[in-house]
Image (spheres, rainbow, N blue to C red):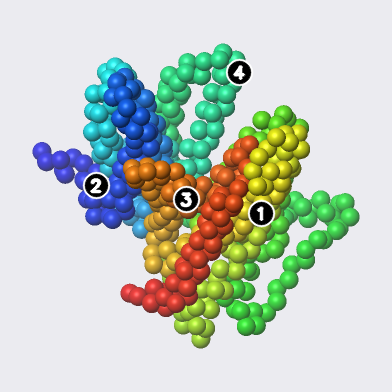
Amino acid sequence: MKLGSGFPLLLKDLAELANRRRTYVFRIIYALLVFAAFLVYYVPEVLNASLSPAILAGKGRNVAIVIFSVQLAAVFLFTPAIVSDAVTSEKEKLTLGLLFLTGLRPWEILLQKYFGRLVPIFSCLLLSLPLLALAYSLGGIARPVLLKGVAMLVLGCLFAGALALMASSFLMTSVQAFIWSYALLLAFALGLAAAVFLSDNLSGRPVDYVTPALWAAGGITVLSLAAARLAIVRRAFLRPANVLLRLFRRLDSLFSRLNNRFGGIVLLRDRSPMPEDAPVAWREVTRKSFGNFRYLFRLLVAIEVPVAFVVVFAIMADFHNSYLFLSGAILLLWAFAFLAVAVMSVGLFTSERSARTLEVLLSTPLPVADIVRQKTLAVRRVILVLAVPFVTVLAAQTHLRSCFFLFNASSSGIFSGWSAFPRFLFAVCAVFVYLYAVMWLSVWTGLRSASPARAVISVIVGVMVWNLLPFVAGVLALCLPGDPADAVIFSLLLSPAALVWMTGVAPPLENLNLPLVFGLSFNILLHVAAAFLFRFLCLKKADAYLRKP
């Protein structure tokens, strides 16, 4: 019996993935991540070993740990993106019901979809075999350790894939499944981090909890597959619903009842002015929940209240823990803001294509550039709302840095004692510049793509590459003759992640100096130029992108 007769859906998915350019982009980025991490650790060791080659003896264990850690992070990063549309793509194409009419059972459909998306990921794991062979040749690592590392990677693939498959079975669109896959993975990571933190406080040996965490991941994998089996049939023919809009309407009714009972105060009255000279912008702000001022205020309250609690709790704690809390809050805000702006901007035109209203929109007498400019109004308002919690956390962090400099007068550097305020300015500028750059990059990607999920994934991959390229260039600069320190620092400062780290996460012991200020300023100006470049491409090429067959 041929393989195709027993696993037709598996071979179909493998053939489709093999014909997608995105599959090979993932493999290239995965290889760059693994080999760049290897070079970051191994090149300094080789340079030190030039004086004494015996230094490399027994370093294999450390090299293997670096390789396994980076691969596990890459698996958690890429697996949800590959698996999240396994079932939702069939729902969007209205072909899932046809699969039920075949001789395949729901379990067979689910497992073939599952392993059809995991096979390319398993093939990426093989890219590290030469590096693991080199680590084994250096000595210091036993064969059981290598086998445990490989088992950890395989279990990580199965675990992340099962979560993404469950989200794909429950939800109706690929974008929703994509976001919830990462949300579930982040929830597990936060729970694991909390368990490790508690174990560190209780027993002092977090390593003792690694094996229970692996067992927990295996159990969650089985439960996720079982939940996906229950949902793939029961939720196969549900219509997509705007859950956020429904939640906002319920909150509106609740607030209206409370307001009528306690005074009838109205902060923002609903207005429906005529579109006048901006009909597309009027349509965006009246039709979509995030374009309305009332719903934007709801969003601001929903984000700002938890942020305010975090800030108050952080200020009441000791300096070290409060700084860690605020740094973690900044990173979470960046992740949320990036995904929110990217998904909204990508959907500006991909949603019009899906609803078959793009032709009607283009038939209006408005220039296509004006249509693009007006459709971004709601996203620009969301960026202004998202900037408020950023400013709140950054202001609290600036206060902590100022207190640190007041009690540590021994700080040195050209900006000693007041470097907290310049960091605040750089951080606020980064919020607006980076989010506007992500908005126009996402709009440009959405104009050129027909699939919302593919466009969102392309934006995420593009931003990742843009952040990683300066680090790869910095590693390569280490191989330059002479003292490459200046070249390495300058290349690292070109990355948005470096500026976010320096202004929002780095400890206050590091003072700003003129070269660092120049590098951060150049970073901001570079991304301002990138934002204007993508804006120019969107406005100039929109007609060609939207009217192509």
Q: Going by the picture, which residue comes out furthest to the left?
A: 1
The residue tagged 4 is: 201
Q: Which residue is mark 2?
A: 14
Mark closer to the observer (4, 3): 3
Task: Please name the amino acid that badge 2 sits on.
Answer: Leu
Q: CA distance from mark 2 to mark 1?
A: 49 Å
Residue under label 1: 425
Judge whether 538 appears above or below 277 on screen: above
- How far is mark 3 from mark 2, CA to CA? 42 Å
Among numbered discs 2 and 1, the one appearing first in the sequence: 2
Report the Cα–Cα distance between label 4 and label 2: 47 Å
Residue 7 visible in the current orientation = yes
Q: Secondary structure at mark 2?
A: helix
Callout 3 touching callout 1 (CB < 8 Å)? no
CB atoms of marks 2 and 1 within 8 Å: no
Tell me the distance, in whole angstroms, between the alpha carbons under discs 1 and 4. 37 Å
Return the x and y of residue 490 as percentages of the image width and height.
Answer: 47, 50
Residue 373 is labelled as none
**Callout 4: SS:** helix
Marks 3/2 in contact by CB < 8 Å: the verdict is no
